């Protein structure tokens, strides 16, 4: 599962609410209350998760190939910059004093397009969650995603902030196409993907035919298309479900508004996600 940020919204209250929702799910499974905050009702999780562009798995049942440029080049951050931005990332998710917290990765794109929304990325860990944070050219935190292996992903690829998200181990290539633009190749790194795309705000007056700001596609090792995200609002709503189970199929990872609620074993299971080695 992935708690992601609404397009263009990285207010502290948004990040804190998303972290609380993810923690509430983890704690509801174990029955262990947080020492720092109360549980958030699981229905609140659905309200956040079901409004994002999660998309549909393979459309029309027809795999296809897509040719785009090679993955973007990156360079590592200096130790000082990585530590500084990593701390900002952890603070933004209230993980700076969490159990086992650490800054795991940090890099920037080399010669990205001039309109790239995010130039620099860091990844942190704490309380069983991996979080990435993207910074623009001015050093402002503008994008981010959180993942946890215990909840997994809804699909083979799961979009987070603009140009980033999570992917399962079988996915070897991802492209992100901004509205009205061409596909941008993503860098796949440790279970997160990163594409230097421009910022596309979501439409405020949405109808079924309204296009999504980004379309994300994932490919397997043979080059076949295995995932396409929602292309319209109608597509996104069609993928809403009453419930999702964790990768084991034994516990809930998402509860929608539909009642009566099916048992976890009758919910669609999420796919396994883990922090992968480079």
Image (cartoon, helix red, strand yellow):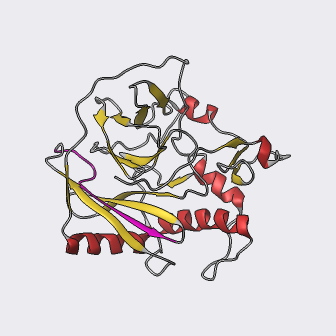
Q: Residue at x 65, y 52 (%)?
A: 46
On the rendered structure, is 36 left or right of 99? right
Q: Residue at x 38, y 54 (%)?
A: 277
**Is 272 drawn above or below residue 129 in the view shown?**
above
Q: Is residue 160 magenta?
A: no
Can residue 65 be seen here? yes
Q: Position of residue 168 (x, y in %)?
A: 49, 43
> In front: 169, or 264?
169
Can residue 231 be seen here? no
* Residue at the extreme right of the image, as rendered: 260
> In front: 276, or 37?
276
On the rendered structure, is 266 left or right of 34? right
Q: Is residue 120 magenta?
A: yes
Q: Position of residue 83 (x, y in %)?
A: 28, 74
Q: Position of residue 39 (x, y in %)?
A: 68, 71
Span colored in magenta = 114-126
> In front: 107, or 205?
107
Numbered disc total:
0
Q: Quadrant of residue 29?
A: bottom right
Q: Position of residue 273 (x, y in %)?
A: 52, 50
On the rendered structure, is 259 left or right of 41? right
**Is 84 drawn above or below residue 74 in the view shown?**
below
Q: Quadrant of residue 185?
A: top left
Q: Residue at x 25, y 39 (%)?
A: 71
On the rendered structure, is 153 left or right of 198? right
């Amino acid at each position: 599962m992935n708690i992601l940020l609404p397009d263009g919204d990285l207010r502290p209250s948004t990040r804190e609410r998303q972290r609380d929702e993810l923690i509430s799910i983890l704690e509801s499974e174990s029955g262990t209350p947080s020492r720092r905050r109360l549980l958030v009702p699981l229905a609140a999780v659905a309200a956040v998760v079901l409004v994002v562009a999660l998309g549909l798995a393979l459309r029309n049942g027809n795999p296809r190939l897509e040719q785009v440029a090679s993955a973007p080049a990156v360079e590592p951050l200096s130790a000082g910059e990585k530590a500084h931005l990593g701390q900002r990332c952890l603070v933004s998710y209230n993980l700076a004093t969490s159990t086992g917290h650490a800054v795991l990765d940090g890099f920037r794109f080399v010669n990205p397009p001039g309109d790239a929304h995010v130039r620099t990325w860091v990844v942190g860990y704490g309380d069983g969650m991996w979080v990435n944070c993207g910074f623009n050219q001015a050093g402002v935190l503008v994008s981010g995603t959180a993942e946890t292996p215990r909840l997994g992903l809804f699909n083979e690829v799961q979009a987070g902030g603009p140009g980033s998200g999570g992917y399962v181990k079988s996915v070897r290539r991802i492209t992100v196409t901004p509205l009205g633009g061409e596909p941008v190749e993503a860098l796949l790194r440790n279970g997160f993907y990163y594409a230097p795309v421009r910022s596309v705000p979501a439409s405020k007056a949405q109808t079924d035919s309204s296009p999504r700001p980004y379309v994300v596609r994932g490919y397997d090792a043979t080059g076949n298309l295995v995932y396409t995200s929602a292309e319209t609002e109608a597509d996104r709503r069609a993928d809403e479900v009453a419930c999702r189970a964790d990768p084991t199929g034994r516990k809930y990872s998402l509860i929608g508004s539909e009642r009566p609620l099916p048992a976890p074993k009758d919910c669609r299971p999420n796919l396994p996600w883990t922090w992968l080695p480079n």
